[in-house]
Amino acid sequence: MANPKRKLEGRHPCPKCGKSRKFFCYTCYVPISELEGVLPVVKLPIKIDIIKHKHEIDGKSTAGHAAILARDDVSIYTYPDIPDYSTENVVLIFPSQHAISISQLVDKENYDSIINSNNLTLEELPRGVNRSTLMKTALKCNKAITYLESE
């Protein structure tokens, strides 16, 4: 099958809000009608909530791509309008120069060092870990949050 995106010319109305869009609506997170059923749908092993900065420009954000391709597993929120995560097992993933990678997070040795750090001061905690996210349930976690920082 030829790539249907190559045949699309111009812009098309969003099926939800009616705004003019090229391939998908970055406000409603849906593909234009001409691409509905054509784009792949991805099933992720976890649920992901993306929390965008309130000044992040929707049309420039790549968060919408995830919401369209994995629509059952990705939700997008704009800070400060976010769900209450206090009753869930949550891993907060935040990009920074000092953050540990996901593979490091679930690495058994690193996980054990995090679990065994209950009595440490904040300064003594392993790099990339803080008291509010000690990851005691990281391996059992069923939801992750990705916080995308907008410069």
Image (tube, rainbow, N blue to C red):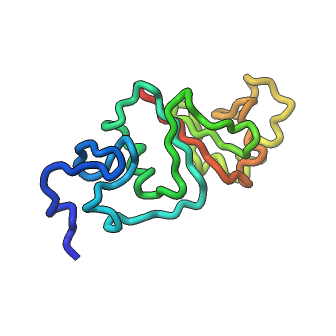
Query: Going by the picture, which residue comes out furthest to the right?
Result: 119
Q: Quadrant of the N terminus?
A: bottom left
Q: Residue at x 68, y 36 (%)?
A: 84
Q: Nearer the viewer, residue 137 or 65?
A: 65
The x, y position of residue 95, in whole percent, is 51, 35
Number of numbered discs overlaid on the protein picture: 0
120 to the left or right of 99? right
The x, y position of residue 60, in whole percent, is 32, 36
Q: Is residue 87 above or below residue 151?
A: below
Q: Quadrant of the C terminus?
A: top left
- The reply to whether residue 105 is visible in this rendering is yes
Q: Residue at x 51, y 64 (%)?
A: 43
Q: Quadrant of residue 73?
A: bottom right
Q: Residue at x 55, y 35 (%)?
A: 94
The x, y position of residue 92, in whole percent, is 62, 39
51 to the left or right of 113? left
Q: Is residue 54 above or below residue 68?
A: above
101 to the left or right of 84? left
